[in-house]
Amino acid sequence: MGPSRDSRPAWHDALAGATAGAGARLLTAPLDLLKIRLQLSSVTPTLSSSVGAAAAPAESLPSVLSAVLRESGFRGLFRGNVSATYLWVTYAAVQFAAYGRVTDFLHRIPPPSEDARLPARFLRSVADDPTAAAFCAGS
């Protein structure tokens, strides 16, 4: 069995969060790029088009994927990934660390009954997201 929560430093949680954030971004970066390209392909490029004119048909996922691969190769799927990875790593690190600290704090308070455990879990989840968002807002 591993160390208890009280003996584990906060940077362990932060490192776990940073690793999870980097891995998640690495796996989702190509999908995010394709999603953005698809969203942009449905936007009419000029303002001079008439209001009643039909928009050009949106591109398909395979056509956008093949265009990216043709223009930039496999590495093109990860274009612009460094700044987004920085955001995901810092956000997840703070979120994991905040969740760990709130969990430690709530474990020190004995619940009055078994029914009080659900609100404590809810409070932990509510506390970690705003903490991470506030910390990473300047990123």
Image (spheres, rainbow, N blue to C red):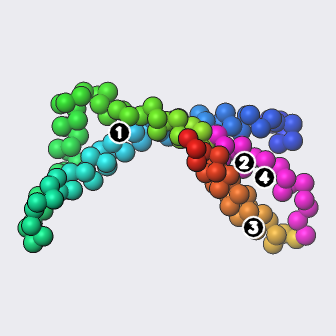
What element does badge 2 sit on? helix
Part of the protein shown in magenta: 93-112
Q: Residues within 10 Å of mark 2 (few under 14, many from 20)?
A: many
Residue in view at x 79 percent, y 52 percent: 103
Residue 14 at x, y percent in the picture: 69, 37
Residue underneath mark 2: 98
Q: Which of marks 3 and 1 is nearer the N terminus?
A: 1
What element does badge 3 sit on? helix
What element does badge 1 sit on? helix
Residue underneath mark 1: 30
Where residue 118 is drawn, which disc sits there?
A: 3
Residue in view at x 21 percent, y 43 percent: 64
Tag in front: 3 or 4: 4
Q: Measure how far apart labels 2 and 4 are at the Cα level.
A: 6 Å
Quarter residue 73 falls in:
top left
Q: Is residue 81 magenta?
A: no
Q: Measure how far apart labels 3 and 1 are at the Cα level.
A: 37 Å
Q: Which of marks 2 and 1 is nearer the N terminus?
A: 1
Residue in view at x 75 percent, y 67 percent: 118
Q: Earlier in the sequence, mark 2 or mark 3?
A: 2
Q: Measure how far apart labels 1 and 4 are at the Cα level.
A: 34 Å
Mark 2 vs 4: CB contact within 8 A: yes
Residue underneath mark 4: 102
Q: Residues within 10 Å of mark 4 (few under 14, many from 20)?
A: some
Q: Quadrant of the N terminus?
A: top right
Q: Which amino acid does label 4 sit on?
A: Val
Q: Is residue 20 left or right of residue 69?
A: right
Q: Which of marks 3 and 4 is nearer the N terminus?
A: 4
Q: Does the magenta stretch include residue 98?
A: yes
